[in-house]
Image (tube, rainbow, N blue to C red):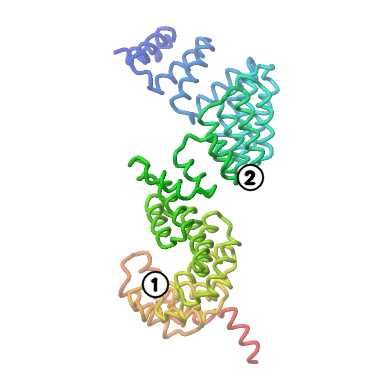
Amino acid sequence: MSLQLAEQFEANEQYEQAYEEYKKVYAQTPDDVGILERLGHLSLILEKTDEAANYYYEILKRDVANPLAYEQLMSIYENTDRYKYYIYRGNKNSIEGKLDFAVNDFKKALAHANEDETQVVMTRLTLANLYRQLGQELKAIDEYNLILEYDNLHEEIFLQLADIYMHDEAYPSAIDVLQRAKQKGFDTDRINEALAAVYLKSGDAKSAIQYTKDELLKIQCMLELGEIQEAYAKLNNLPDEYKALPRYFTLQAQYCYSSKDFKKALNYIEEYNKLQPNSPLTFQMRALVYEEAGDDYNAHLNWGKYNMLRGNKDIAINELLNAVQLKADDTNLLFLLAELLTENGDVNHAAEYYERIAQIDPNNKEALVKLAAFRESIGDYRTQVDYLEKICEIDAKDLNALKNLARAYEKTKAKSKAIEAYTKYLELVKDPVDYKMAKDRLDKLDQGVGEAEESVGLIDKIMGFFNR
């Protein structure tokens, strides 16, 4: 009854009574955002602004993207607390993806922080995260370094700054930040493990092993230090729960690599790949093993795939080109290279590799489809027809190829062939929209109207010029 009574009081503009009844409902259903909105609204009507702010804040705890709550909080604090006003406006812009506006809002909030250390630190931390999202790493670093001048910090701030330096491979800077954390009293497992990871990444396994409690990381350090047999003994004596972890298989692979047992190393890498499919590390490890084993083809192939996953397209293309020079008849490799070249905007070069695939495997439908599309894109409709005819020979029920072939016949002024292709298409197509489109084209051709009488491709025009 309380909810109905509250709504009745509100409808009768008995706001104080409605407010009290809604509070009773809220006590029973504290996560009901609709009730919180009513309480916030009534609090404003009754000029209970502090209570209204609290209700809208509670809404955001349950629904961080609630636009009404942000708007009302901004309205509440606009003339009373400019710091909070800009904070809520910045959060609203951030959630809406307007990151540049959010940055400006948090900068303005800093100007109204009144030297409150907690407000300054939290605002600068938010700015640092926004700069990271915007890809402005140097500005993010500046914010973190300003934060580190304050006391009463959290270890997470040091870890975040170290992570940026790690990403940029600025290992000495990452080490310095983490050592500063220890000096400020954060001699914790997280800081020490982060230090160990940075030292190992920088090639200093001797320092890394001093900081870590992680048994797997200790074994990795021992392998790096050349303590091969000691590391292997420790690896094999690990409790069973370690032997199901992906890192266990990478360490076994590393040991086998060091022992020149490349076949076994590849088996362990495959076990790792089952747990972490398509990881860049899989291809990196394979590439290193194949390099050491003298298998240049597979080394280049895996370095190519590794760099593809890392977003280094130019390096990936170069590695795959080297692989093609060593093995020119691997159609999977040729497809991979052609797709990568296409992604990189080099469609002409990509077409060369699709043509190679078609030469190796004349019935490779996927390559023929790519070649037909390429020829259409450059206006070479006659060659497009050749590829499409081949596709239709391979698969007479390929509706898309048949439709494209009919259109290509029109463009090459092969009216009778276009009519024949559209007629076959109409016999097979089920979709009513596609059926009507083809029927309309066929009717126009029967009436002597359409592209078959008027359209000439770019290549046709050029050839026509030279044939004059």
Horizontal placement of 10 versus 324: left or right? left
Question: Residue at label 1?
Answer: 438
Nearer to me, 207 or 118: 207
Q: Image point 45% across, 76% down: which residue?
A: 368
Q: Is residue 126 visible?
A: yes
- Dot 2 falls on a residue whose secondary structure is loop
Q: Image point 54% across, 32% down: which residue?
A: 192
Q: Image point 46% across, 20% down: which residue?
A: 58
Q: Quadrant of the image for the N terminus?
A: top left
Residue 240, compared with residue 339, is above or below; it is above
Residue 432 image point, x, y percent: 34, 65
Q: Check disc 2: other Cα within 10 Å, few if <14, some if 14-19, many if 20+.
A: few
* Amino acid identity at mark 1: Ala
Which residue sits furthest bottom?
468
Q: Check disc 1: other Cα within 10 Å, few if <14, some if 14-19, many if 20+.
A: many
**Image-quadrant location for residue 4:** top left
Residue 287 image point, x, y percent: 51, 61
Residue depth check, mark 1 versus mark 2: number of the one nearer the observer: 2
For the residues bearing labels 1 and 2, Cβ distance under 8 angstroms: no
In the image, which disc is placed on residue 168?
2
Residue 266, compared with residue 332, is above or below; it is above
Horizontal placement of 412 versus 98: left or right? left
Number of numbered labels in the structure image: 2
* Amino acid identity at mark 2: Asp
Residue 285 image point, x, y percent: 49, 56
Horizontal placement of 455 versus 165: left or right? left
Query: Which numbered disc flags the more N-terminal residue, 1 or 2?
Result: 2
Which residue sits furthest left?
1
Residue 445, compared with residue 240, is above or below; it is below
Residue 166, compared with residue 188, is above or below; it is below
